Image: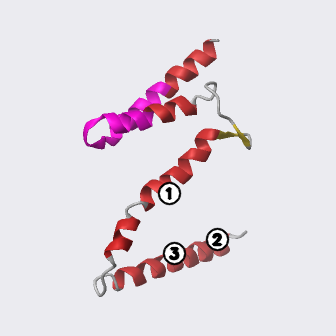
Amino acid sequence: MTASSEFFMILGMMIVTFSIRYVLLAFSGRFTLPKSLEKALNYVPPAVLTAIIVPSVLISDNKLFISWENPYLPAALAAVLAGFLFPKRVLAASISTGLVVFAIVSYFQLIR
């Protein structure tokens, strides 16, 4: 692939992405969504994050890896628990708890 074709491919992707988002933003003030749809849209971010994180935690080498030897599993469970325990759902607490548990489990698996 030549540099000019890469440039035009990136330019085309930029135009498509911009036009899709611009159309939505241009008409955003002209209509209102039904309350039921607004309520349903609140569940989109957790659903997308779950769809991204769960496979990376539970699948290794294209196989289901549910075991305490999987360091991602206790780290993910600890991060979820920290998210529920800390006040105001502090994101930094969940992330740091998950990282610390992952490091501890990985360390103990390494010295074993």
Provide residue 46's location: percent of width, then percent of height. Answer: 44, 54
Q: Which mark is residue 14?
A: 3
Mark 3 or mark 1, which has the lower sequence index? 3
Q: Is residue 22 shown above or below 80?
A: below
The type of residue carrying mark 3 is: Met
- Give the mark nearest the N terminus, 2 or 3: 2
Return the residue at label 2: 6
Residue tagged 1: 48
Q: Nearer the viewer, mark 2 or mark 3?
A: 3
Label 1 Cα crowd, 10 Å radius (few <14 / some 14-19 / many 20+): few
Give whichever of 21, 35 is nearer the camera.
35
Q: Position of residue 37 (x, y in %)?
A: 38, 73
Residue at 61%, 25% (x, y): give it.
Answer: 68
Quarter of the picture containing the N terminus is bottom right
Disc 3 crowd rating (10 Å Cα; few below 14, some 14-19, many 20+) is few
**Image depth: mark 3 or mark 1 in front:** 1
Q: Residue at x 64, y 12 (%)?
A: 112
Q: Is residue 39 left or right of residue 15?
A: left
In the rendered image, residue 90, in percent from the top left (x then y), is placed at 30, 40
Residue kind at label 2, given as amino acid type: Glu
Name the residue at 61% across, 77% down: 8
Q: How is the image coloured?
A: secondary structure
**Front position in the image: 37 or 54:** 37
Magenta residues span 79-101
Up-down relation of residue 87 to residue 71 (above or below): below
Mark toward the viewer: 1 or 2: 1
Q: Secondary structure at mark 3?
A: helix
